[in-house]
Amino acid sequence: GLLDLLAAAGCRAASPMQLIAPGPAVLLASALAARPAARGGRPFCMGGGFGAAARDTFKYSGKVRPGKQSPKRSVPKSISKPDYWKDGQPKARGPMLPWQIQKKSEADIEGMRAAGRIAREVLDLAGAAVAPGVTTEAIDALVHEAAVSRGAYPSPLNYHGFPKSCCTSVNEVICHGIPDSTKLRDGDIVNIDITCYYGGYHGDCSETFLVGEVDEAGRQLVKVTHDAWQAAIAYCAPGKEYKGIGAIIEDYIAPHGYSTVREFCGHGVGSVFHETPNVIHARNNEPGTMQVGHTFTIEPMICEGVEKHILWRDGWTATTKDGKRSAQFEHTLLVTPDGIEALTARTENSTPFWWEK
């Protein structure tokens, strides 16, 4: 499993697609590449002889199952692309040590604002498409077209071989769900994670959406996750320690009996998709102090039950170990002299949350 992989590598807590090693940050997907797991969303199947239907023997924790994937989408030559677009391997690296955090220049910040605005527009379009009967593949197609039409590259596409343009994580899927033929059902919750690369910078955001009529427990999970995320954002300002983010989230969700995922966490972002700092959403001793010009994500994954996860054989999809639901929200954030600015902030065109209606 993933935790065994971490132990074998001498690594500890992880962020989405990223490990934190004793020295430099190491990308999770790089480690996963050494696994014998199948890629491209097709589970490794066993059983049956010649002419017999293959049987998936993987022990899923809940009701979500992998569907059929369409071929990988293409991006026009005219669009600027990140360095991994062709072979899946990122070449650019941020600072090597976890306490070394890049301060962005004014030009960097303006570039990130533009990328963040596009990511927000694309996320709003994707969220508006959520409804019973809609496939996650259809959402991915919409995301891809929306990004490309704005002159942006959908950052997840071929990042360490990820086959789609966004992540769609339904119910017990914590993160990195691969869009496919799966139809959303009335009562589901789904997180859509969008990153757009534009003008040399990444803008990264996500929200969890309700599909049709969701039960009260599911609605509460989504709102508490949102509110814990907002409390963590409100804490941020120059001079604050990054490790304080996790304590705020953990304390906020504790009265509700929820848990917060440790193995996946937030990260620095800019011209590099994942860089320092490592933003862990639970109590931790991660080094680093916020300074003006730092850009990073906060993206807590909050679970109804246990925070431990299992990894599907596609090498990407992480689900709760007990099959209970998980919710997540994310912004790309900039530390300013006065506090914090969300570079992927919602606009007047964003669909109101259910509790705002």
Image: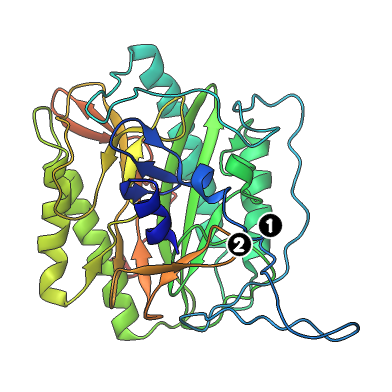
Q: Secondary structure at mark 2?
A: loop
Q: Amino acid at mark 1?
A: Gly
Q: Position of residue 128 (x, y in %)?
A: 53, 61
Q: Secondary structure at mark 1?
A: loop
Write the residue at 44% across / 49% down.
349
Q: What is the quadrant of residue 210 in the picture?
A: bottom left
Q: Position of residue 102 (x, y in %)?
A: 30, 20
Q: Amino acid at mark 2?
A: Asp
Write the residue at 28% across / 18% down.
103
Return the residue found at the far right: 51
Q: On the rendered image, what quadrant is the C terminus found in? A: bottom left
In front of the other: 112 or 259: 259
Mark 1–mark 2 Cα distance, whole angstroms, equals 6 Å
In this picture, is 60 found above or below 97? Answer: below
Q: Position of residue 73 (x, y in %)?
A: 75, 46
Task: Classify mark 1: residues with Cα within 10 Å, few (<14), some (14-19) or many (20+).
Answer: many
Residue underneath mark 2: 314
Q: What is the quadrant of residue 108 in the picture?
A: top left
In front of the other: 284 or 244: 284
Q: What is the quadrant of residue 111 in the picture?
A: top left
Q: On the rendered image, what quadrant is the N terminus found in? A: bottom left
In front of the other: 168 or 117: 168
Which numbered marker is on residue 40? 1
Asked if one can make out residue 258 in the rendered structure from this viewpoint, the answer is yes
Q: Position of residue 31 (x, y in %)?
A: 50, 46
Write the residue at 35% across / 66% down.
327
In front of the other: 123 or 154: 154
Query: Badges 1 and 2: C-beta atoms under 8 Å apart?
Result: yes
Task: Classify mark 2: residues with Cα within 10 Å, few (<14), some (14-19) or many (20+).
Answer: many
